[in-house]
Amino acid sequence: MKVFIVLAAVAALTSAQSQFKCPNKDGQYEDDRQCDKFYQCVDGVATTKLCPDGLVFDPTIRKINKCDQPFNVDCGDRTELQPASSSEKCPRRNGFFSHPDPAVCNIFFNCIEGEVVEVKCTAGLHFDEYSGTCVWPDSAGRQGCNAQDKKTKDGFECPKDQKKDPQGQAVAHPKFPHPNDCQRFYVCLNGVEPRDLGCQVGEVYNEETERCDAPENVRGCEDWYKDSEDAAPGPKARS
């Protein structure tokens, strides 16, 4: 979407008469220069209206409310906008906006009439303001992003090479055994964000099946709970 030129002042507001000439059919029609401005035509009389700050007018929408998020609308040559009504985290009263710190790429703000909701992307994704969604970092193309949760407390880091299944497809959330604790294992969310998890007491992690299993079924872990008073199954352990 093209960069908008903010107007110095708003012309006629709701209920103001306009020089716009209505077509024969009643309805809502876009302004030819300002993307968030439109005209409501009733019986040939045009009333100038504005979308809520941050939204723009889409004449192709077949609903009464034709104001939508800018990333959903092709404004073309309609590059002007009403002056912004901004706050600390909301550049405009409505919309999806990046975190003010350019190094924080996985958090964005959803502003609704000036009220802000902080949203965190799914592990491994970055917010893309041009699409209003969380995407893979290479698609977002943002620079200077901080590495988020790349290591567990004990130093495990997800391998850079994607783990693949027997069919050669990349595993979305690959699992890895703990190097010296039979009960614990790691999960790499989206292949990049590690989580340290554990089997319930009495079970150990089976690397072959990628599931928690009885100790006797896992080579090297047969005696993990030997002489332990906690061998009875209990709640799952979490680090």
Image: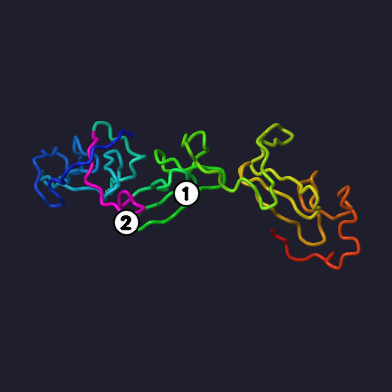
Residue 85 counted in the magenta span: yes
Q: Residues within 10 Å of mark 2 (few under 14, many from 20)?
A: some
Provide the secondary structure element on which disc 2 rests: loop
Q: Is residue 225 above or below residue 51?
A: below
Q: Residues within 10 Å of mark 1 (few under 14, many from 20)?
A: some
Q: Is residue 208 left or right of residue 101?
A: right
Q: Is residue 221 left or right of residue 14?
A: right
Query: Quick one: quadrant of the N terminus?
Result: top left
State the residue at coordinates (70%, 51%).
Answer: 154
Magenta residue span: 78-94
Which residue is labeled 2 in the image? Answer: 114
Which residue is labeled 1 in the image? Answer: 107
Residue 74: which quarter of the image? Answer: top left
Provide the secondary structure element on which disc 1 rests: strand
Nearer the observer, 139 or 29: 139
Three-letter code, disc 1: Ile
Three-letter code, disc 2: Gly
The spot of residue 18 in percent (x, y) is 10, 44
The spot of residue 87 in percent (x, y) is 31, 54
